[in-house]
Image: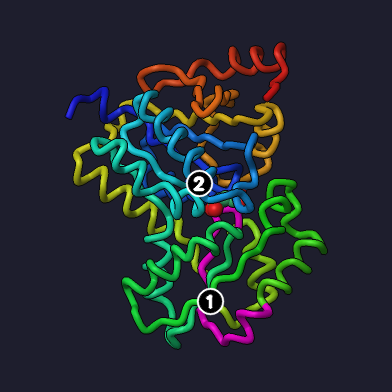
Amino acid sequence: MSEARRSAPIGVFDSGIGGLTVLRQLRRQLPFENVLYLADQAHVPYGGRPLDEVRAFACAIVDAMVRQGCKAIVMACNISTATALESARENHPGVPVLGVIGPGAQAAAHESRVGRVGVLSTEGTARSRAYTRAIHRLAPDTQVFEVACPGFVPLVEAGETGSAEAGAAIELAIAPLRAARVDTVVLGCTHYPFLLPLLQAAAPEMCFVDPSEIAAVRMADTLRHEELLRAHVSPPSACFSTTGDPAHFRLQLDLLPDLPTISSVLRASWHGAALELAMARDGKCPDVRELDERYQSAPAQV
Ligand code: DGL
């Protein structure tokens, strides 16, 4: 495998900031990799949308990332994984595309002692029943209770991860899982790890599992197996992009701990059903100061 291919970025995407919880784990497992993160904030939240619409968004994002030369892609978004993983793999057989539902199911099947697992997710992921199927493939006797939490993503995107409103929404979501006496709960949306302190306080008897850790390990294994690991010749770049407002996204990023050093924050644009990623070629990001000036002088519009 050529050095240029090994240096190409890993594409990571979500509807918003949720996928950053996966990016953090990827950084731990793969500290030398270039990454290209896309937040489709023009369309967030995905969770209440028709599943076909989400599939179209996710497939178009994967197409754009492949056009940018990404060597591998993580759907750091459960509803995208539920709707689009198979299609994206069929469309791009030469590029490893990984999701988060298999890893979440694996973590839950491993963790549950009583065989009763809860899944907190967006409406669409719950409607798809993808977690029930994935857990049953690994542990057919497990009872799975999927609970949709439509209020969580807007709260996280607004930075309200400790508010009274978040606490009330969490109590509502936990009630049916407590009634079902689950011992393990999958955070079936990548935004939800940001709510973990409140979730643990509301239900200390439950074990909350975050699929992102196993997802990152699987990506590391895949790159190793495909001989796609980047050599540590220079510090890696982390290019961020949003279909929303880059200045606002930058503020959100600055508030979050444990992220890779930001190389750039750019605007990506939808043109009909196709996404254009304003990223540099060859996995390198443009100089961050130049880009800061560019988006400050031309405010983002979607
Ligand atoms: N964070 C995404 C997920 O894991 C989508 C959240 C949303 O936009 O509704 O499903």
Total number of numbered labels? 2
From the image, state whether disc 2 or disc 1 is nearer to you.
2
Residue type of the residue flagged with mark 2: Asp
Q: Give me the disc on residue 52.
A: 2
Q: Quadrant of the C terminus?
A: top right
Residue highlighted by disc 1: 145
Occupied quadrant, residue 229? top left
Q: Is residue 229 visible?
A: no
Q: Quadrant of the N terminus?
A: top left
Query: Where are the magenta residues, as a range?
Result: 175-192
Q: Is residue 239 above or below residue 193?
A: above
- 14 or 150, nearer to the observer: 150
Residue beneath the point at 65% across and 27% down:
246
Q: Earlier in the sequence, mark 2 or mark 1?
A: 2
Residue beneath the point at 31% across and 33% down:
71
Residue beneath the point at 20% across and 41% down:
226
Q: Is disc 2 surrounded by few (<14), some (14 to 19) or many (20+) residues within 10 Å?
A: few
Label 2 within 8 A of ligand 1 by Cβ: no
Instruction: Please check the rendered image and state whether residue 119 is part of the magenta-colored stretch, yes or no.
Output: no
- 84 or 263, nearer to the observer: 84
Residue type of the residue flagged with mark 1: Phe
- In this rendering, position of residue 156 left or right of residue 239: right
The location of residue 199, given as percent across then percent down, is 65, 69
Residue beneath the point at 39% across and 24% down:
68
